[in-house]
Image (cartoon, helix red, strand yellow):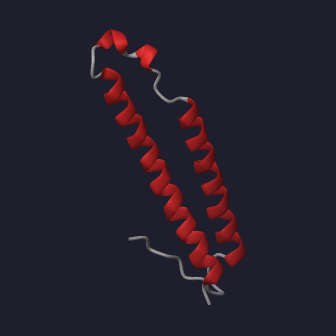
Amino acid sequence: MIRMPSVHLNGTSREALTNGYLEAAQAVSKARRALCEAAPNARDYYVQGEGAFGAATREHQARDQKLKDVLDELTALVEFVVEAP
């Protein structure tokens, strides 16, 4: 569960909150693209044995899932702030 900020006169402005979350989301998207470029290559693992490439691939996918989860949370924060009364 994500704790959503309260948008009110004494707090951070809606615009600043939105821009901050959007900037963070763009950075995470960029990180996901970079991670994709760094995906495991079977040639780098075959000397380690039969299961090494599969394990490296699963680890890589888990890293990407973590970034996706953060991106999803940031997206939810943006949507909330934009739609908040």
Q: Quadrant of residue 37?
A: top right
Residue 82 on image: x %, y %: 65, 78
Residue at image coords 58%, 42%: 31
Give the x, y percent position of residue 62: 38, 42
Q: How many numbered dots are placed on residues in this image?
A: 0
Q: Position of residue 57 (x, y in %)?
A: 39, 32
Direction bottom: furthest residue:
85
Between 82 and 57, the residue placed more toward the observer is 57
Could you tell me if residue 13 is visible in this image? no
Image vertical order of residue 18 relative to residue 66, above or below: below
Residue lying furthest top: 47
Residue 85 seen in the current view: yes
- Residue plotted at (69% across, 70% down): 16
- For residue 52, side relative to residue 30 (left or right): left
Residue 78 versus residue 32 in the image, above or below: below
Residue 68 lies left or right of residue 62; in this view the side is right
Q: Residue 84 appears in which quarter of the rendering?
A: bottom right
Q: Quadrant of the N terminus?
A: bottom left
Image vertical order of residue 42 relative to residue 4, above or below: above
- Where is the C terminus found, in terms of image quarters? bottom right
| Image quadrant where residue 60 sits | top left
Percent x, y for residue 41?
47, 21
